[in-house]
Every structure is written in structure tokens, then in C-alpha cells.
Amino acid sequence: MANIALVDDDKNILESVTMLMEQEGYHVRSFSDPAAALTALTTTPPDIAILDIKMPRMDGLELLRRLRQGAPDLPVIFLTSKDEEIDELMGLNAGADDYVRKPFSQRLLLERVRAVLRRAEAKSAPPQPGEQKKEALVRGKLALDPQRHECTWDGKPVRLTVTEFLILQALAQRPGFVKSRDSLMDAAYDDQVYVDDRTIDSHIKRLRKKFKVVADDFDAIETLYGVGYRYKE
Amino acid sequence: MPHFSALTWRILALNALALLILIGGVIGVQSSGRGLVEERLAGIQQQAAIVASVLGKYAVDNQSQALNADLTELLLRELIAPTRLRARIYLPNGHQLADTRLLLPRGVVEVEPLPPLDPWNRFKTWALRIYDGVMGVRPFSQLPSYSEGGEDGRIYQEVNAAMNGETSSAERVDSQNRLVLSVGVPIRGVLLQFGELLVTTEGGDIDDILRQERFTLFEVFLVAFGVMLLSSLYLARTIAEPVRRLAAAADQVRSGSGGRDVIPGFPERNDEIGDLADSLKEMTAALYNRIGAIERFAADVAHELKNPLTSLASAMEMIVRAPDEAARQKLLVLARADVKRIDRLITDISDASRLDAELSREARTEIELSHLLKVIVDIYDVTDHGRGVVVVLKDELPAGSKVMGHDERLGQVFRNLIDNAISFSPDRSQVVITAQKHHAFARITVEDSGPGIPADNLESIFERFYTERPGETFGKNSGLGLSIARQITQNAGGRIWAENRVSREPGKASGGARFVVELPVVAQ
């Protein structure tokens, strides 16, 4: 089973999350001090790191930057409690694979860990052409590879978090059909109870931003005020 | 009517009032026309005296010892013609001998002007009358009226007086209310009185001079009024207009429709208006800073509450699927601790958010520092922490040293620092509090023998919600204590900082933490 590194200055969170992950069969190393985590994880890199953002002395972003120096492909999920932190995370293009908002449900965290690990495995595994073709989703310039959680626009790669990928996939599966925020939430979060409507809005905002970087005129995601979102046919 | 602000109107009204008082005063002083009349009378008297003496000498028929009519007329014509006066000569019995009005070629018959008839002229007359009334040109209406005496001069009291050898004068108004001055002088020889000379001004003569003066005054008034109007408007523009703009901007700030920069600046103005604008700008900035601080505080609070909430949620979920009873018990302990943390956070947060308001509301008083410290340390002496940490007070302050502050709040500063020191202290160690005078300040240090503070965190530990705690003290602190201590200290005009004690053991970076509070001493 995979090796998980968990870094959060809140020791109580460490305890219950560690218990959960261990019960799921993962091997967990937890740290409340980012400096200690850096030392230990540089020596033996984990398969995935779950990092809190706001920590004294060294925040999660800094820790990731330093960890990536030794292990550039290290998959990372951030724990955040502020929208501003997410903006910072995305703005810096720190290369987070996903983030989970505090307070989170254990089930969501587990799903994200599995999704990110799957993506990492798919990347390192040799491609299996037959299978990939069957699952790949192509809508005009957009191409989604659900196996690897990879996305391209006009051939250019767009780096999406798992959540963003799931939302985009739900939209692109049925172009022209309106998806309500609720249904998008179900697609991305399953039955996560803590997420509010605005969360979807900010995900969509970030999605558009990421596509605008590779294509100025990106307008494939339409807002239908008061109803939801739709992928343009 | 142009739309002026109330202030503009007031400035205009006050300036106009000042001008009116000035003009009114000048008119008041001049209105009687007394000076002019007296001056004129004196002149006429002099002239009359000269004319009378000349007549008495050269117009007398030597044989009859009476005035010779021809000579009299001749001399009168010569003497009176250059003046604008009318002279009449009466015989001693009061019978008129000569009248220049009948002699002088250019005014053979004086035509009294009749009131004009056409409406325009009538209007002009009325307007003039009103103007005269307002400007006080006609102050003579209460004088006796003048009438033509015809052949008999005795209807004039001056002539009568002159018949008795006296010189006298009179002021009258004619049918058109114009001033007529007259002077009666006896015409005398060495022994005899030959007759009387009556010299009168022509009607309207004096009035014209007065009106001319008044008109000049009126012109001055008009010019002054115009200048006043312009200067008032300028003044209003430089006062009322900026004030109006500032008020409008302040309204915008109040209604929240403006941003931080809606207050207009007047950087070119070094006066009160400029100061007012600057002050308003600063006030708005302070307001926005405070709003920003509240916003950040709210965000921080939400953020801080989410950690124990996350832990609690996680523990709750985990309890359901806990593998065994031991794990379940452990999770229950966690959950309970999280509930406590949330409670402590909420208490401290509400405390901290009240602090600002309390500090600005409550008046600061003089506090005797030694007494305050002793009371606090005494409480720690009788409190058992179960770890044998002793709090020691070394008070070296001069007796009666006082500082300004809120005693309850200053006490909180020291309690927070002592609590903090105890929590980092090893078991059975000392927390030492030292109070000393340092220049104009009382310097209070709180020292522990704990692990000390990492050098790059000496400042950030005073930030709100900064918590970094080793081992089992985790979760017993909200991260607000030091930030609250700093806020109170700064409010009391002092400062607070942290440093590390020099280690006595070789190889150890710190001999413990030292927190220093400096408060200005106001009295001893």
C-alpha cells in the first residue's frame, strides 16, 4: 500500500486522520512540525503528501517547494481553510494536485487521495492504447483523459486539480445541457455535506482562468445565472 | 436666484451688513448737511457784510443821505453777478429798493420749474424722491417754508433784525422743498442806517451740492458693493465649496458607495480647509484600516475555528468506524479536547474583539505598578499548577511609581505573559518577574527557563493566532494572548517585545525566553 505523509500543526487533526488512513491500509507518517517533515521526507519521499497550508515558521507552500526539489513529481493534496489560500495556491502554480477545504469529510479526503494516487500511477505506467481510446473524452479542442486525469486544449496541456477535472468532465460529457451547481457538486464531491454553492463558482472561475492561459478566447463554459453552468456545443 | 449654499448666503449677508453699516454711518454723519450749510452761511454772511459796507459807502446819495437806486443797482450787479446769490435791498422802512433777480441780465425772471407732466418724468421724479429719501438728501423738510416777500421786506425776520441793526440768518425751504439760506445785514453809514441787504441762495443750490456728494457716495457704495459681492463669492467658493465637497464625500463614505479615495484633497491649501481635508482623509483611512482589520480578524477567526472543527468532524466520523474500543476512547478524548478548544477560542475571540472598544471607551487611570504586580503574583503563589513552577517577583521600582492604563487590562498583560512563561517552563523551575526603572519607563521582564524562542519568530509570536507549542501544551492556547498583551501595552503608551536569555549551558542556544514590557512612568 501507498506511503502517505501528513503534515499539519494541529495535532488533533493528525491523530484522527492518521487513524483513518491506517485503517484504510495506508502507511502514514505524520508531522506537526514542517521542518521535521522536510528532513524526514527528503530522506524517504512518500507516495503522496497531505499538507496543511497555514503552519508556523514554514507554510505548506514553502514545504512543497522544498520537497519538490528532491522529488519533482511528488503528488500533493493541500488542506486549506481560506479561499485566499486557494487563490494563492493556484496563482503560484505551486503544482498542487488537489486541495481539500477544512473542515472536510474523511470520505472526501480518502477519495481525493485515491484519485491523485491513481493519476500518479497512470502517469508512471506505460500507456495502454486500447483502453485509453475508449475512455478519452474529446469535445472540439478539449480532450480529457479520465484515467490519468489529464486535460489538453488544442493539444496544449492544462494542469487541473482532480476536483476541477471532475467538474469539467461532468460538463463536457453532455454539451448544451445545463448542469446545476448541485449536480456539479455531486460529480466532484460525491455526497460531501460541507460544500456550499459558492465553492462550485470559484472552481469554475479557476477553470476558466487556467484555460485562458492557453487560449485567450476560451469561452466553452457558459454561466446561466441562477441555474448553473453548461458546456457550449 | 442662483443656488448658493447657506454658508455663501451668510457670508454675503454679513459682508453686506458691514458695508451697509459703514455707508449708513457716513450718510448719518453727513445727512444733516450741517457742515455744508454752516460753511455756506458763513460765506454768505461775509459776502453780505462786504456788499453792505460797499453799498453804505458808495451807493449813498450825499445830499439825501439815502441809498441812490441807480448806484445801488449798479454796484449790486457788479458785486453779486459773479456769485450764485440773490440780493435784495430794502429801505429802512422795509420797502424793497432793488432785487438782483430783476437786474441780472441772465436771470431776468427766475422761472420756477413746474412739476413735469409726462409719466416718464413723473416716474423719474418719484424715483429721485425715493433715492433722495433713502440717501437722506432732503433733510430740510422740517424747516419753515420760504415765500416771496414782494415789495415789503418785513415778512423776513432777518430784514426786521437788520432794521434793528443786527445781522442774522435763516434757513427755509421753498415750495419744492429745496433749501434756501438767507442772511440779513444792515447797510450803514457812519451815523445812519440806509437800509437792509438780504442775501439768499437760489433754491436747489445747496441741495444740488448735497445730492452731488451723496451721488458720489452712492457710486462708491455701488463699487464697494460689487467688490464685496465678488470677494464674498470668492470667499464662499474657497470655504463653502470645499466644505460642501468634503461633506458630500463624507456622505459617500458613510453610505459606503465611495471607496477609500473619495475624500477630495486640497494639497495646495495650507489653511484650515486643507487641514480639514487631510484630517478627513486620515480619518477615512483609519476607518478603512479598522474595517480591514475587522475583516481580517473575521477571516482569521473563521480560519482558526476550522482547525478544531475539522479535528472534531474527523474524530466523529472515525468513532463510527473505529477498529476497537481503545481507538474509540482515544477519539472521544480528542473530540472532547476539540470542543474545549473551540470554546476557549470563542471566549478569547470575543474577549479580543471587545478589547479595542473597551480600551477606547474606558478612561485610563494612574496605576501603582508595584501593587498591581504584587497582587497578580500573589494569586499565582496560591494556585497549584501541578508542575511545581514558582513565580518570583523582584520589585526594584522606586516606591509609588505609577503608570497610566486600565488596571484590569494591564493585569491581563502580565497574567498572559506569566501564563505563557509557565506553560513553557520545565517542571519545578522558576518564572522570574523583575520590575525596574529604566529612564522614563518602568521596565517589567518576565523570564522562564524554557526552550526559548526561535530567533526569526521573536516578532511573529505577537501576531494574532500565532501558535507554536511543543508537546502536551498543544491546544491549551488560542494564539491571542501575546497579541492582546501587545495591544494593551501599546494603548498604554508602552511597548512589548521578546528576546532570548543568554544560555549558561554551553551548546544550548537559549537560556529561556524573556518578555519585556516598558510603560511610561507618570509619577513617583
Image (cartoon, rainbow, N blue to C red):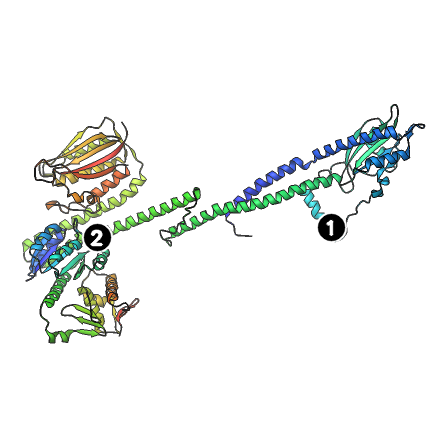
Q: Amino acid at mark 1?
A: Arg
* Tags 1 and 2 on a common chain: yes
Check contact, mark 1 vs mark 2: CB within 8 A: no
Q: Which subunit holds the residue at mark 2?
A: B
Tell me the distance, in whole angstroms, between the alpha carbons under discs 1 and 2: 91 Å
A108, above or below B287, in the image: below
Q: Is residue A189 among what the camera can see?
A: no
Q: Which circle's residue, 1 or 2, is located before the other in the chain? A: 1
Q: Nearer the viewer, mark 1 or mark 2?
A: 1
Where in the figure is residue B448, as x and y percent of width and height? Answer: 13, 37
Name the outermost residue toward the top: B191
Q: Quadrant of residue A170?
A: bottom left
| Tag 2 secondary structure | helix
Name the outermost residue toward the right: B63
Q: Which subunit holds the residue at mark 1?
A: B
Where in the figure is residue B409, as x and y percent of width and height? Answer: 25, 38
Q: Nearer the viewer, residue B264 or B486?
A: B264
Residue at numbered disc 1 = B122
Q: Amino acid at mark 2?
A: His
Q: Nearer the viewer, residue A44 or A200?
A: A44
Where in the figure is residue B79, as x and y percent of width and height? Answer: 82, 35
| Tag 1 secondary structure | helix
Image point (25%, 73%), residue name: A177
- In the image, which disc is placed on residue B8? none
Residue at numbered disc 2 = B303
Where in the figure is residue B303, as x and y percent of width and height? Answer: 21, 52
Left or right of B391: which side holds B221? right
